[in-house]
Amino acid sequence: PETVDSAWREFFDGLPRVKSTNGGNEPGREVAHAEIREFFKAIAHYQRAVTINDTHPFVYAKLARAQRRDNQIDQAVQSWKLAIRLKADRPEFYVQLGDLLLQQEDMDGAIANYKQALQIQPDLPKITEKLNRLLKKQETFPEPVTQEFSPPHHPGEKDSSDIEEVPI
């Protein structure tokens, strides 16, 4: 039977070798595949990785990036959702998903994901700006959103605003 260690070794050994900046060879990366326009190889390798270990959010993130570069937008959306399900505290996951949803013209979905990214990390001025533009375009929120924006709380629903702040 295939062990996780041997499967991961096989996965990384299967990546093409690329010249590193220090003159040696190192395992190829999705970026190297993207540079030579071999998205399908990167996607295949990341899909193989998730069959080995489907609990690693960063493999899903790499898969989503490769899928996006190969214009597999629906698949990339699903990969970001899986990454978020596994590691919901990464604002960049929500930003990437929001960008894809915006590309699919799902403004509500994009707005929700940008808001969630700002809940996790309020000091994202470019995302705050993007969110303000979307909300203005949608005309659902007349005043500009500040970096301290938090989404509305629905009664009976638990969220991070239910956690008491401890003075420092």
Image (spheres, helix red, strand yellow):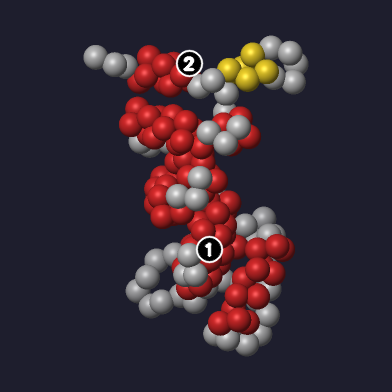
Question: Residue 145 appears at what percent x and percent y?
Answer: 65, 76
Give, as a three-letter code, the residue at label 2: Asp
| Residue drawn where x is 63% and y is 34% of the image | 35
Question: Can residue 52 be seen in this snapshot?
Answer: yes
The first of marks 2 and 1 along the sequence is 2
Left or right of 20 on screen, residue 101: left
Quarter that holds the C terminus: bottom right
Q: Which residue: 67% across, 18% down? A: 19
- Of all residues, the one furthest to the front in this rendering is 37
In the picture, the disc for residue 136 is none
| Residue receiving disc 2 | 13
Q: Quadrant of the N terminus?
A: top left
Query: Where residue 167 sits: x, y (%)?
Result: 64, 59
Identify the secondary structure beneath mark 2.
helix
- Percent of width and height locating residue 156: 35, 74
Q: Which residue is mark 1?
A: 103
